[in-house]
Image (tube, helix red, strand yellow):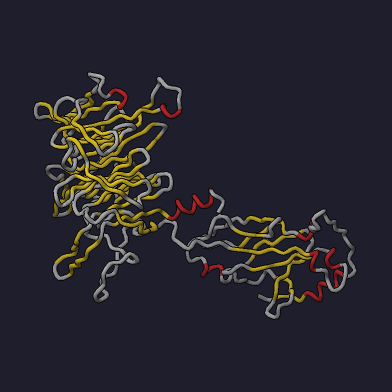
């Protein structure tokens, strides 16, 4: 950057008039209007994008609240200052010799690190040498994202208990997270945590002795199904066979908030409605019941017959609000795979279903260009206003941008932490985790902080084919992921 020496400017201002400054009770200097920067702007940052800069006059800071994209340091290492406006002051910075020299904004400047500049008012030049106490200092900082906003950021949380080696199910009930699994002795155990980092465990008691095929937490009660029977619990530990349902209940499907027209209390504005599958005369039907009507008699509502493509087991659901109304979207497994023909191959696929509190409808498509592949032990989540699904083996994540109708493989940035196994003797570590090939897992979301938590049972894993297989072992690990952009947004909202 070429600069002009201050001495010339100083001699020029020796003949200018003096603007009297005032001192307050704390001897703080009130700078003349021409000793402040009124506007600052950089040249565009790739694709013609301009970033707004904030000028904090009190602290003497100039910075961009919206960080520049990752790798923008290769742009701002030589960039033009497009706008640097004062009323009539002179802007300087230190040259290589440590002397104050005026800035020529027609030359590029390196802003990879914060730089300090000084604005000299006419009053500062009233004496010779110029009075530096009557010049105002600024620090220019260009914030650049260290992480790609479109990528998932993964972090290790800790362990649950290494006695968890088989299938597991996790729910959030009240303020607690409850993970259920059967230990090596065949005992159903529940692992309890309020923060997903420290856990206690105990045996469940009562009538439920096996891992349920579905567990549904409502506001004040937990419902579960096993062997076509319903069980209930108010604490997640003690279970009794429920008498609140009639007939053969196969599995719970979802819970959805239904508006309560009879209450003006905000906490009671919505009532949880459970939906479930029942078999009657060899036909599967979809039913619903409000939590407030459990045990009141004939409170079950038959919604409709389940369609041929409605899943039968390992059903995962997610709930979100659209147009002021809550909706469910589910994905699950079928007794016989649903297949489509792609080229000369038959591909097993998953079909999503949606529920608006009144009717269930098939959402998925069998289009050869927008299908969702079949997942074993599938999970579906609503995250960052999109639907995502994945399952055992952790090979890929699929995303739907239209509430489950059409699907595509998610961007490689939104993926599980895969590793390069070409290194001889490589084994996954906490620093370099591998999820490929894993089963026996469960997922819960922290919607307040935008985290997705993955809980894994301890296990031995092998993935790959032929001579290119990779075995490894892992503990009962808990990992969490969050989209960087959501982290940036929260930091901005918090003023960080």
Q: Residue furthest left?
A: 281
Q: Taking 465 as reference, is 55 left or right?
A: right
Residue 207 location (% of width, % of height): 17, 35
In the drawing, does residue 297 fall left or right of residue 12? left
Q: Residue at x 25, y 31 (%)?
A: 275
Q: Position of residue 73 (x, y in %)?
A: 52, 68
Tell me: residue 496, above or below residue 330.
Answer: below
Viewer-closest of 204 and 390: 204
Q: Does residue 332 appear in this view? A: yes
Count of numbered circles on the image: 0
Can I make out residue 406 in this image?
no
Residue pictured at 38% horizontal, 46% vertical: 446
Point out the image quarter for the N terminus: bottom right
In terms of image quadrants, where is residue 99? bottom right
Q: Is residue 337 above or below residue 153?
A: above
Residue depicted at x 25% and y 22% = 295
- On the rendered structure, is 270 left or right of 280? right
Q: Position of residue 238 (x, y in %)?
A: 24, 36
Residue 98, position as x, y percentages in the image: 71, 78
Q: Quadrant of residue 427?
A: bottom left
> Which residue sits furthest bottom?
97
- Quarter of the rendering containing residue 48: bottom right
Q: Nearer the viewer, residue 110 or 174?
A: 174
| Quarter containing the C terminus | bottom right
């Amino acid at each position: 950057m070429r600069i002009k020496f201050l001495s010339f400017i100083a001699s020029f201002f020796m003949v200018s008039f003096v603007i009297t400054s005032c001192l307050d009770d704390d001897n703080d200097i009130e700078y003349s209007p021409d000793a402040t920067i009124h506007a600052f702007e950089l040249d565009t940052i790739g694709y013609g994008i301009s970033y707004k800069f904030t000028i904090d006059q009190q602290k003497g800071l100039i910075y961009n609240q919206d960080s520049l994209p990752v790798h923008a340091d290769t742009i701002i290492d030589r960039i033009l200052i497009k706008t640097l406006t004062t009323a009539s002051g002179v802007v300087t910075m230190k040259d290589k010799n440590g002397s104050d020299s005026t800035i020529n904004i027609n030359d590029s400047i390196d802003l990879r690190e914060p730089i300090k500049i000084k604005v000299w008012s006419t009053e500062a030049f009233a004496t010779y040498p110029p009075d530096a106490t009557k010049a105002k200092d600024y620090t220019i900082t260009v914030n650049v994202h260290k992480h790609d906003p479109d990528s998932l950021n993964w972090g290790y949380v800790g362990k649950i208990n290494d006695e968890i080696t088989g299938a597991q199910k996790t729910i959030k009930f009240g303020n607690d997270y409850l993970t259920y699994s059967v230990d090596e002795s065949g005992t159903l155990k529940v692992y309890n945590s309020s923060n997903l980092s420290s856990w206690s465990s105990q045996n469940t008691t009562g009538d439920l002795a096996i891992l349920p095929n579905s567990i549904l937490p409502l506001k004040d009660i937990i419902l579960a199904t096993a062997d076509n029977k319903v069980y209930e619990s108010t604490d997640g530990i003690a279970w009794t066979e429920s008498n609140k349902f009639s007939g053969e209940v196969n599995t719970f499907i979802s819970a959805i908030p239904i508006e309560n027209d009879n209450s003006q209390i905000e906490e009671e504005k919505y009532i949880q409605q459970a939906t479930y599958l029942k078999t009657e005369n060899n036909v599967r039907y979809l039913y619903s019941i409000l939590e407030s009507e459990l045990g009141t008699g004939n409170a079950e509502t038959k919604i409709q017959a389940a369609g041929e493509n409605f899943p039968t087991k390992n059903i995962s659901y997610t709930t979100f609000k659209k147009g002021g109304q809550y909706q469910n979207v589910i994905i699950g497994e079928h007794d016989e795979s649903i297949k489509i023909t792609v080229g000369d191959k038959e591909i097993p696929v998953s079909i999503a279903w949606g529920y608006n509190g009144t009717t269930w409808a098939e959402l998925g498509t069998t289009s050869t260009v927008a299908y969702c592949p079949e997942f074993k032990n599938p999970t579906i989540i609503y995250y960052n206003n999109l639907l995502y699904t994945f399952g055992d083996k952790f090979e890929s994540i699929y995303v739907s941008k239209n509430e489950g109708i059409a699907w595509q493989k998610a961007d490689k940035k939104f993926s599980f932490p895969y590793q390069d196994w070409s290194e001889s003797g490589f084994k996954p570590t906490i620093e370099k985790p591998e999820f490929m090939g894993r089963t026996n897992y469960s997922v819960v979301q922290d919607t307040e902080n935008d985290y997705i938590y993955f809980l894994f049972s301890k296990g031995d894993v092998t993935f790959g084919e032929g001579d290119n297989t990779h075995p490894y072992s892992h503990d009962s690990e808990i990992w969490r992921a969050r989209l960087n952009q959501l982290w940036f947004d929260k930091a901005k909202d918090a003023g960080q």
